[in-house]
Amino acid sequence: MIRRRLVHAASNASICCTPASSHSSYGRRPLSTIISTTLPSHNLPTNSERNNRSDKPIKFRRRFSSLSNDVDSSNREAPIATTTTTIRHQRPIYVAATRQHVGKTSVSLALVSHFTKRFGTENVGYMKAVGQQCLRVWDEPVAVVSDENDDDGGIGNASKYNGDSDEESSQEKGKYVVIDKDVKLIRDHFQMYHLQYSDMSPILIPRGYTKNYLDGKIDHAGQMADIRRAYLNIVKSTAANAEKSRRGGRNDCGSVDTITICEGTGHAGVGSVVGAGNARVAAELGADIVLVANGGLGRAFDELELNRSLCLQYGVNIAGVVINKVQPDKFEQTRDYLTKAINQMWTGPNGEPAPPILGVVPDRPYLGCPALADVESHFGSVLLSGSDHRYRHYDVGSNVQ
């Protein structure tokens, strides 16, 4: 029932971010600068690298992180170049949390809202690689309008539908798929109709999935391949739309940026029993992690430190931290002392700066109270009158807002 409230509370938010000063080091830049590092298009690991992934996580991570200008261009792919526009695929952002019900979806909503306003909806992707709470929806193939006279070979140019380019796929009518419920929330709210549900929610863990995995009925390599394939399809979708925007003359600048927001499930280790923990999936995608924690000081930092250890194990960079549900009267205290703790404890041995606190979000108790729209949705009913009060929140029969 809180999903509708999250949309209205977070879609217009910017994570209540306290601006971070710009530094020359990667780890101290604000998030909008951090993600500006270009991710090589479709630079996913080979089968041999995937097989050695658990033994050499740091080397695997460096495959994606070696993106600075002094790297030999022969070791990485360049951004997609066109006659007038360069399509730059930004490094994906993976939103994880210290535990359940901390605010991953709220932060994901805020990030998607920010980047759709900045880059345009068609240039932003979203996925929840591993989901748990699911629902059944109708998934149609996404049409990509192509120019038959253009033979520049850009991604998505030759396909009528995303994914395959053969005649059979173009005749596909669609099908029912089971997806994580957060995927439907974000796709529908932001009208991200350039993405397919099946790509946005590639893996689900329903009841009995863990036993089947441990019994060998679910192949780990195939599971991770599904996640990578879904991510690449999202990259292709956003690239195709960026190319379409260029052809239509809607973009007259020198480059078009695309980015994908990946929402995790629970803390960094959730999913490890089936080989798909958040930290490992983030490493597979070459993503930077944003950690979300509840307000507090000692307990909040302890939980952050525990999750950080998993990120270090898989060589995943922590782009920043968001502190959610902070008591309003302790807002400045929480922000100041957690900043001190992170700077003191997470500064690297060679002076590498600690990741910044990207935002501190005060708690708003009324958001936990149901609104009439929640009751309407929960019971599948229709409000007969008073539609102007649909989004008012109520507590024990008393109107609190």
Image (cartoon, rainbow, N blue to C red):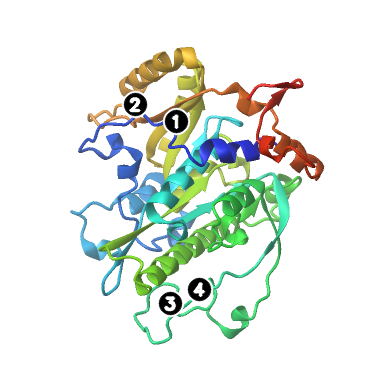
**Whole-percent x, y for residue 105 in the image:** 56, 39
Residue 157, labelled with which disc?
Answer: 3
Q: Residues within 10 Å of mark 2 (few under 14, many from 20)?
A: some
Disc 3 from disc 2: Cα separation: 45 Å
Disc 1 from disc 3: Cα separation: 39 Å
Q: Which residue is mark 1?
A: 322
Q: Which residue is mark 2?
A: 346
| Residue in front for this viewpoint, 312 or 117 | 117
Q: Nearer the viewer, mark 3 or mark 2?
A: 3
Q: Nearer the viewer, mark 2 or mark 4?
A: 4
Q: Which mark is first along the chain, 1 or 2?
A: 1
Disc 2 from disc 4: Cα separation: 45 Å
Assign the N terminus to one quadrant of the image.
Answer: top right
Q: Residues within 10 Å of mark 4 (few under 14, many from 20)?
A: some
Q: Nearer the viewer, mark 2 or mark 1?
A: 1
Residue 6 visible to the viewer = yes
Q: Which mark is first along the chain, 1 or 4?
A: 4
Q: Could you tell whether 201 is left or right of 339 in the image?
A: right
Assign the C terminus to one quadrant of the image.
Answer: top right
| Residue in front for this viewpoint, 85 or 100 | 85
Q: Residues within 10 Å of mark 1 (few under 14, many from 20)?
A: many
Q: Which mark is first along the chain, 4 or 2?
A: 4
Check disc 1 and report its element: helix, strand or loop: strand
